[in-house]
Image (cartoon, rainbow, N blue to C red):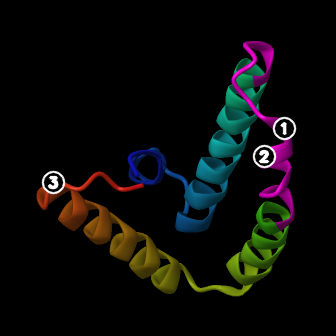
Amino acid sequence: MVAVPMLKKSGLSVKESHATSVLMMAALSLLSAYLYLSTGRLEIGKALAFIPGGIAGGILGSLFFVKMKSTVLRRIFGGFVVFAAIKMLLGQAVK
C-alpha cells in the first residue's frame, strides 16, 4: 500500500505505478517461496492447490488492467486502503 503512492510521486503514471508494484510483489513472492522451500517450511501439496487460482487471477487482472481508466484504478486502490485502515482501527489485522 506504500509502493504505489511512492512510485506515483517519483513520476510514474498510475498504471505504471500499479504494474511496477505487482512486479515487486511477484519478485518478493518468489523469493519468499524459495526461502520457505529451502528451510522445509513449505508443504508443496498444499501450495499447489492455489496455483490455478493465482494464474487465472493474474490473467484476468491483466486483461482488465489494460482496459481500465486510471481514475477507476485509483478509486479501487483507494477502496482497499480505506478497507485496510478500518480493519486496523478496529483491531483486526487484514488477513
Q: Give the label on residue 91, or none.
A: 3
- Residue 83, label in figure: none
Local secondary structure at mark 2: helix
On the image, numbered disc 2 is attached to which residue?
47
Provide the residue span drawn in magenta. Answer: 37-52
Residue type at mark 2?
Ala
For the residue marked with disc 1, what is the amino acid?
Ile
* Figure check: 38 above or below 90: above
Q: Nearer the viewer, residue 13 or 24?
A: 24
Q: Name the front one of labels 1 and 3.
A: 1
| Residue at the image point whose x is 13% and y is 61% from the top | 90
Regarding mark 1 in the picture, which secondary structure is present there? Answer: helix
Q: How dense is the environment of label 2, judged by Cα within 10 Å: few (below 14), some, or many (20 and up)?
A: few
Mark with earlier residue (1, 3): 1
Of 41 and 60, which appears nearest the observer? 41
Question: What residue is disc 1 on?
Answer: 44
Residue at 79% x, 67% y: name it. 53
Q: Confirm or deny contact between disc 2 and disc 3 (CB under 8 A).
A: no
Q: Nearer the viewer, residue 30 or 11?
A: 30
Q: Position of residue 12 (x, y in %)?
A: 55, 54
Task: Name which residue lies at 66% across and 33% down.
Answer: 28
Q: Is residue 73 magenta?
A: no
